[in-house]
Amino acid sequence: MASICSIIPHYLLKTIIDKGEADDDIVAECRSTLAQVNQLQTARIEHSHQIALASQGLAQESAGVQGFIPPHIHQAILRGPAGEEEREASRRTLEHDTKFRTARRRERHLSRTVYDAQHRWSFTRDKILIPEGGPLLDKKIDPSTDGNECYIGFGKTYDFYLEYFNRDSLDNQGLPLDGFVHYGQNFGNAFWDGEKMVFGDGSRLFNGLTDELDVIGHELTHGVVQHTCNLKYEFQSGALNESLADVFGIMVKQWGENPDKPQTAAEANWLIGEGIWRQGINGRALRDMENPGTAFDDPIIGKDPQPAHWKDFVVLPNTKEGDWGGVHINSGIPNRAFVLASKKIGGLAWLGAGQIWYKAISSGELNGEAKFKKFADVTIKYSGEHAKDVQKAWEEVGYPFPERG
C-alpha cells in the first residue's frame, strides 16, 4: 500500500475529531484536511508503482560512470538465492563502485520552482512565484514569506544531500523540485505526493510549515527513499520509511539552520515539527526522536502515542485509521536508535551515524518489505569502527526484535 506522506498523520487528525474536545471550526478543518489527502491517494499509489518498476532496472546510485555489469545486477544477486561466495563478490564490487563514484564530485543540478496554489484544491502551474535562480519575493507580493521559505528550504535540503552524501537531488539524477504554497483553505498540513511538495497556510490548530527545515527535509527524503530502497508504506517497512524521513529531516535542520555553526548530536533537541502547534496546545513538537511519546499531551489532540522500545510496539491494522499499521507511531523505535547511535559516535550526526544509515538505504540489501531487524543488521554491517556503538544503540530499543506484528 502506498500513501501520501502528510507531516500531520491521519491518525492524529482523526483523534482530534473523535475526542470531541476541539471547537467545531477546528474539527471542520481537520475533516477537510483528511478529505483532501484521501482524494490524492490514487495518483500517489500509481506514481509509487511506476517508481518501483523503474527501480528494478536502474542503478540505485548512478553517478555518470558505470561498469559493463550495472550495479542493479549485483544488487539483485545480493537479494537472491546465490551462494555466499557469489554474494560476497557482488558485495565487494558494489562497495568498490560506491567508493569510486563517491570520490568524484557531483555537479550541482539544483532546479527549484515554487508555485502559488492560490488557495485552490487543485494544482495548476499558471502562477510561478520563484523559478530557479529568480529573486526572493518582496513581502508586498507574499506577506507570509511561504514562497521564500519553500525555495530556501528546497535549496538547503538539496545542498545537504549533495555535500554530504554526493547525491544529486532525490533520484540522484537532478530531479527538479516543485513546491506549491497556499494550498486550499485553512489546510493545516504539508505533504510529498511522489512528484511535488505541497504546503497549506496552517489552521486554527497547526501553524504553517514552510519555515520548518526538518519538515521540508522529511518530506523530500520520502523521495530519496522511493529512489533507493523503496520501502513499502505499511507496518515495519513503513515505520522505517517514516523514521528515515525523520532522520534525514532532522539532520537537514541541525545543519541548515546555521551552516556556519551546525548542531552536534549532543547539542540538538531532536524535535520534529518544533513550533507546529498553535498557542494554547500543550505540545513541544510533532515527534521527539530522543524521547518518543513525549512530544505532546493535550485534551484536544491526545497524548503522543509513539513507543520508544520494541516491547511497546503498537500492533495496528493496515488502514488509514490504523496509520497503515502504525507507520508514524512505531517509527519512534528506529528514531531513538538513530539518536543513540549519533550520540555514541559523537560529533555531527551526518558525518557519523548519518553516513551509516545512508549506506544502508543505498546498499541494495534492503527490499521493500524490510523489517526493523533487517535494517538494523545492515546498518551494523556498514558501521565499520562504530559497529559496537551502533549495535548497542539498536539493543537499547529492543534489537534483535523478536518477531511480532
Image: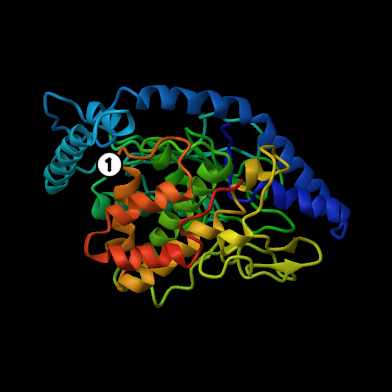
The part of the image, by quadrant, that contains residue 312 is bottom right
Q: Is residue 162 above or below residue 338?
A: above
- The residue located at (11%, 43%) in the rendering is 100
Q: Is residue 264 above or below residue 139?
A: below
- The residue located at (19%, 39%) in the rendering is 88
Q: Which residue is mark 1?
A: 168
Residue 380, image x and y in percent? 32, 56
Q: Amino acid at mark 1?
A: Asp
Q: Tell me if 286 is positioned left or right of 245 in this view.
A: right
Question: Can residue 181 be seen at all in this image of the molecule?
Answer: no
Q: Tell me if 196 is positioned left or right of 207 in this view.
A: left
Q: Is residue 76 above or below residue 359?
A: above
- The residue located at (62%, 47%) in the rendering is 200
The part of the image, by quadrant, that contains residue 176 is top left
Q: Quadrant of the N terminus?
A: top right
Name, please, the residue furthest toward the bottom: 267
Residue 5, image x and y in percent? 56, 42
Question: Can residue 112 be seen at all in this image of the molecule?
Answer: yes
